């Protein structure tokens, strides 16, 4: 789960692959197989997963001042975008097949698939239904209570089963039975199963046998002194009546909140910010979010720490010790469970949550250097879009919000994540409605945003929304004073979409009008054979001349 980041599950799964492969004795053989399978197209994967650039033998570095600009993306290439997505899916399948092979199978584990973006689901479906990936097994987990019939994951699973039902094995995971809970409690307390039956019955009754809830409940009992270790008998002891009086039910949200509220106030604040950033975050992101920290946090820093960075480092250490966070690498952390992240987020008053998220996003945008912002762009803009009014304080901020959404949409389109791209374009268009960003002063921004929105909607199969975006610009071309150079690319999107949908007569008529607009003599609707021969000979002479 990576917020708005397309392919976040696959990126997380393969980010550490390079280091793991370097530690294997077959590193050279596997690397050679990967390079042979993907060739120069490996750059497509390296753009998604920079940690693999060494394995893929590509140079994925870029200057610090590089940003995603209009020149990086051709907003009129509808069919090119769809081809690029198909090419990415094809290369990714070849990449995975080169790792998973006979005698050395690959097991890919994806957790919380109910939160996957549409691009990830498309890749998952393409991978699982590919008969050439016989040495690869994909294990995905999701919460069935969060996936209804209309959920995107349900449709994906349905498509996979329709393609080949034999490749899908459903394994429902229910709550633990009383004997399983008894075994869990005995293992945790290192006692005989018959000696912990009274406690395990309480745990089962209060948590319904949910493993995470059971562990959290036992931790809460120990913290409250209701479960304690007797150094005289070297055994754990508990009081059934006191536990029942204290906990009528074991609401996990309440348990998590109590666990967090036991931390220092500054640690709670840091975890609130971290929960807004995502389930996984690094220390640098927290530093960049410092402008969003409340004023009372600054007073705590002044009173107890040398600076904000020292405070963040200390509070992260406390959270690690208390089992709230775990380290992913030297500078990256993650919540040990998404329900702890949810509890940390709920520490923020409900009426302040969207504003806080937007202020965090704005702080990331304001303080990050260009290469940092490039990697944080989607996280930052997702946060900014939670409350666009945070950007309404000045015309410059409003333009910045629209431009950021345009950049995020471009990045999503380059990764063939069309649903995400359309969403960012919609957020950018909604930001225009805030006022203060006039067409007169920012006409290219308007045209680029609506052009990309039209293409994104088309690529996701929504031609009605595509036409709405084009009409917004083209039908008002006179009032907006669009030049031929500005309106021609917009018309080109519509013309190509008509052609791709096999509406050839409409495409032909539109193309004729476009040629007339730019001063070319329209092609005749009917031609004689002499005319065809004449034009053919003329073309051959021109080809021969330039050859």
Image (cartoon, rainbow, N blue to C red):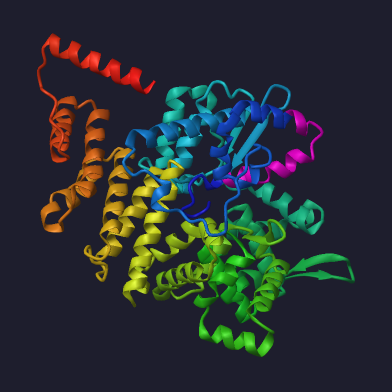
Q: At x 37% / y 60%, what residue is drawn? A: 403
- Left or right for 486, reference 376: left
Q: Quadrant of the C terminus?
A: top left
Tell me where residue 296 appears, x and y as whole percent.
Answer: 54, 86
Q: Residue at x 52, y 71 (%)?
A: 367
The secondary structure that most of the magenta stretch takes on is: helix
**Residue 321: percent from the left, percent from the top?**
73, 68
Residue drawn at (70%, 61%), measured in percent from left and top?
A: 199
| Horizontal and vertical percent position of residue 145 | 45, 48
Q: Quadrant of residue 281?
A: bottom right
Is 188 in front, or is 249?
188
Q: Give the magenta-colored segment's residue range.
A: 10-29
Whether residue 229 is visible here, answered yes or no, is yes
Residue 426 image position (x, y, % from top left): 31, 55
Q: Camera-side residue: 536 or 412? A: 536
Q: Is residue 20 magenta?
A: yes
Q: Is residue 255 magenta?
A: no
Determine whether 351 is above or below 201 in the image.
Answer: below
Describe residue 237's horizontal placement relative to residue 47 as left or right.
Answer: right
Instruction: Work out whether 42 lies above or below 437.
Output: above
Q: Residue sitting at 61 percent across and 26 percent down?
A: 37
């Amino acid at each position: 789960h990576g917020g708005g980041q397309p392919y976040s599950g696959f990126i997380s799964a393969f980010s550490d692959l390079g280091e793991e492969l370097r530690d294997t004795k077959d590193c050279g053989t596997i690397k050679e197989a990967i390079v042979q399978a993907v060739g120069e197209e490996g750059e497509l994967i390296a753009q998604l997963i920079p940690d693999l650039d060494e394995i893929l033998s590509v140079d994925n570095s870029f200057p610090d001042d590089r940003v995603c600009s209009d020149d990086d993306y051709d907003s009129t290439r509808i069919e090119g975008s769809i081809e690029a997505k198909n090419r990415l899916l094809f290369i990714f399948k070849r990449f995975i097949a080169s790792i998973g092979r006979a005698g050395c199978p690959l097991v890919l584990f994806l957790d919380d698939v109910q939160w996957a973006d549409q691009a990830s689901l498309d890749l998952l479906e393409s991978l699982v239904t590919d008969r050439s990936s016989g040495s690869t097994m994909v294990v995905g987990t999701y919460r069935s209570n969060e996936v209804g019939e209309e959920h995107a994951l349900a449709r994906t699973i349905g498509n996979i089963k329709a393609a080949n039902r034999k490749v899908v094995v459903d394994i429902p995971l229910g709550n633990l039975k009383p004997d399983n809970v008894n075994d869990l409690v005995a293992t945790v307390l290192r006692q005989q199963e018959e000696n912990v039956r009274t406690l395990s019955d309480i745990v089962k009754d209060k948590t319904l046998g949910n493993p995470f809830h059971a562990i959290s409940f036992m931790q809460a009992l120990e913290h409250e002194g209701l479960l304690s270790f007797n150094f005289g008998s070297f055994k754990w002891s508990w009081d059934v009546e006191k536990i029942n009086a204290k906990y009528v039910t074991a609401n996990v949200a309440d348990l998590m909140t109590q666990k967090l509220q036991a931390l220092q106030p500054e640690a709670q604040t840091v975890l609130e910010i971290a929960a807004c950033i995502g389930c996984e975050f690094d220390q640098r992101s927290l530093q960049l979010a410092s402008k969003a920290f409340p004023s009372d946090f600054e007073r705590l820093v002044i009173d107890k720490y040398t600076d904000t960075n020292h405070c963040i480092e200390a509070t992260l250490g406390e959270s690690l010790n208390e089992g709230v966070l775990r380290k992913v690498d030297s500078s990256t952390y993650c919540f040990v469970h998404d329900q702890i992240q949810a509890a940390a987020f709920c520490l923020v008053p409900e009426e302040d949550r969207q504003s806080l998220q937007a202020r965090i996003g704005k702080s990331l945008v304001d303080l990050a250097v260009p290469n940092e912002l490039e990697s944080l762009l989607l996280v930052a803009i997702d946060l900014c879009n939670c409350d666009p009014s945070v950007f309404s304080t000045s015309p410059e901020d409003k333009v910045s919000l629209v431009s950021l959404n345009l950049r995020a949409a471009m990045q999503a389109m380059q990764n063939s994540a069309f649903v995400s791209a359309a969403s960012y374009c919609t957020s950018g268009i909604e930001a225009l409605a805030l006022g203060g960003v006039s067409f007169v002063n920012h006409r290219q921004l308007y045209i680029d945003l609506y052009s990309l929105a039209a293409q994104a909607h088309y690529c996701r199969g929504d031609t009605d929304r595509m036409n709405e975006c084009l009409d917004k610009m083209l039908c008002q071309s006179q009032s907006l004073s669009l030049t031929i150079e500005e309106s021609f690319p917009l018309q080109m999107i519509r013309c190509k979409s008509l052609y791709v949908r096999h509406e050839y007569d409409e495409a032909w008529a539109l193309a004729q009008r476009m040629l007339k607009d730019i001063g070319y003599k329209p092609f005749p609707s009917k031609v004689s054979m002499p005319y065809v021969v004449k034009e053919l000979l003329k073309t051959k002479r021109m080809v021969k001349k330039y050859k």
